[in-house]
Image (cartoon, helix red, strand yellow):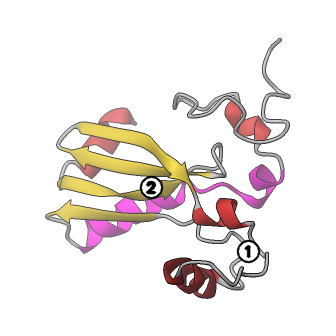
Amino acid sequence: ADRKRKRLFAPILRSKGFIWLATRPDMRGSWGQAGAVVRIDPVGPWACVYWGHGSEPEDDEPERVKKLREEVKGNEHGDRTQEVVFIGILDGDVREQITAALDACLVTDDEWSDLARLIVSDPIQMWQEQPFYGWDKYLAK
């Protein structure tokens, strides 16, 4: 399966963007890939973490914050999103296969209801000591 995955992503020369990992719900991540090298690093908290998603705007907020608030109004997750650009030679079949592979990474509603279960098998190093309340309840003590 690993060899097949490598072939699938072989046409991608470069990719980059911002990611939202379920095991780091309040932290924005950066995604950078060139050739066979992929980096996933923390950037900082999502904007909605600073201003409390669903809270009312302050009168003295900068215009960019007011604009962002308006853009994500009604979005249950605030400004959290996946925004990755892929650069390469991607025909229709490869594009569909890559989309399917990425879609398979999305958490299910069941997983979303208890994110702490995902921490146990998360291969990515933690970015913060306490990613969310109760995150360690399934770890061996």
Instruction: Identify the amino acid type marked 1.
Output: Glu
Q: Quadrant of the N terminus?
A: top left
Residue depicted at x 59% and y 57%: 106
Q: Nearer the viewer, residue 4 or 115?
A: 115
* Residue 20 image-quadrant placement: bottom right
Outermost residue to the front: 60
Point out which mark residue 101 bears.
Answer: 2
Nearer mark to the viewer, of 1 and 2: 1
Along the horizontal axis of the image, is 108 left or right of 33?
A: right
Q: Nearer the viewer, residue 64 or 130?
A: 64
Instruction: Determine whether 139 is above or below 43 in the image.
Output: above
Q: Nearer the viewer, residue 47 or 72?
A: 47
Work out whether mark 1 precedes mark 2 in sequence or the reverse, and give the earlier one.
1
Q: CA distance from mark 1 to mark 2?
A: 25 Å
Residue depicted at x 70% and y 39%: 131
SS under mark 2: helix
Is label 1 in contact with label 2 (beta carbons under 8 Å)?
no
* Range covered by the magenta-colored residues: 92-113
Q: Position of residue 57 (x, y in %)?
A: 72, 81
Residue depicted at x 69% and y 84%: 59
Point out which mark residue 76 bears.
Answer: 1
